C-alpha cells in the first residue's frame, strides 16, 4: 500500500513551486531553465496519471489489430514490421483508429494545450477518414 502523497502529487508540488515561486524570483537564463523544469515536471505528472491506463488501452488495441498476444514493446515492433513489409496498409481503418488513439494519448501527456490536440478532442476524438 502506498502512503500519501502519491508520486504525481509530489511531482505536482515541485512543479507548482517552480512555476509560482522560483520562476518569479529568477531572471534571464535561470528563469528559462526553471520554466523548462516546470514543464518537464508537468509531463512527468501527466505520465504518472494517464500513462498506465493508456498503456492498457494501447496493448489491447495492438493485440486486437495484430491478432496475437505479447507485451507492448514487442507488439509495437511487430506493428512497425507489418507496416514496413506492407502487411498492414496505412489505409486500413483499424490501423488508422489505433494510430489515431495512440497519438491522441501521447499528445495528452506531452502537449495537452496544443491547438491541434484540442481540435481533435473537441471533434469527438475520431480519426480522419482514409
Image (cartoon, rainbow, N blue to C red):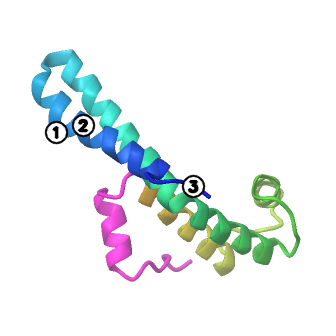
Q: Secondary structure at mark 3?
A: loop
Is residue 87 visible from the viewing direction of this image?
A: yes
Which image quadrant for residue 54?
bottom right
Q: Secondary structure at mark 2?
A: helix
Q: Residue 66: x and y, percent? A: 82, 71
Mark 1 and mark 3 lie on one chain; the one further toward the N terminus is: 3
Q: Residue 108: x and y, percent? A: 43, 60
User: Which residue in the structure is indicated by mark 3?
Assistant: 2
Please tell me which residue is depicted at 64% across the width and 71% down the height of the picture: 57
Of 29 and 1, nearer the camera is: 1
Which image quadrant for residue 75?
bottom right
Q: Badge 2: how crowded within 10 Å, few (<14), some, or many (20+)? A: some
Which one is in front in this view, the residue at disc 1 or the one at disc 3?
A: 3
Badge number at residue 20: 1
User: Taking 60 as reference, is 21 above or below it?
Assistant: above
Circles 1 and 3: CB distance less than 8 Å? no
Is residue 115 one of those drawn in magenta?
Answer: yes
User: Which residue in the structure is indicated by mark 2?
Assistant: 17
Of 29 and 52, nearer the camera is: 52
Q: Badge 1: how crowded within 10 Å, few (<14), some, or many (20+)? A: few
Q: CA distance from mark 3 to mark 2?
A: 24 Å
Mark 3 and mark 2 lie on one chain; the one further toward the N terminus is: 3
Is residue 110 visible from the viewing direction of this image?
A: no
Q: Residue 95: x and y, percent? A: 67, 72
Circles 1 and 2: CB distance less than 8 Å? yes
User: Taking 118 as reference, is 16 above or below it?
Assistant: above
Please tell me which residue is depicted at 62% across the width and 58% down the height of the picture: 1
Q: Secondary structure at mark 1?
A: helix
Q: Residue 29: x and y, percent? A: 21, 16
Q: Which residues are magenta?
A: 110-130
Amino acid at each position: 500500500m502506498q502512503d500519501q502523497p502519491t508520486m504525481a502529487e509530489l511531482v505536482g508540488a515541485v512543479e507548482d513551486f517552480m512555476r509560482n515561486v522560483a520562476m518569479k524570483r529568477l531572471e534571464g537564463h535561470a528563469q528559462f531553465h526553471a520554466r523548462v523544469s516546470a514543464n518537464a515536471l508537468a509531463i512527468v505528472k501527466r505520465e504518472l496519471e494517464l500513462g498506465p491506463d493508456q498503456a492498457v488501452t494501447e496493448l489491447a488495441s495492438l493485440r486486437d489489430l495484430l491478432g496475437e498476444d505479447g507485451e507492448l514493446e514487442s507488439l509495437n515492433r511487430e506493428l512497425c514490421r507489418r507496416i514496413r513489409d506492407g502487411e498492414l496498409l496505412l489505409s486500413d481503418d483499424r490501423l488508422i483508429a489505433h494510430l489515431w488513439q495512440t497519438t491522441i494519448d501521447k499528445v495528452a501527456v506531452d502537449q495537452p494545450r496544443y491547438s491541434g490536440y484540442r481540435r481533435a478532442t473537441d471533434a469527438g476524438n475520431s480519426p480522419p477518414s482514409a
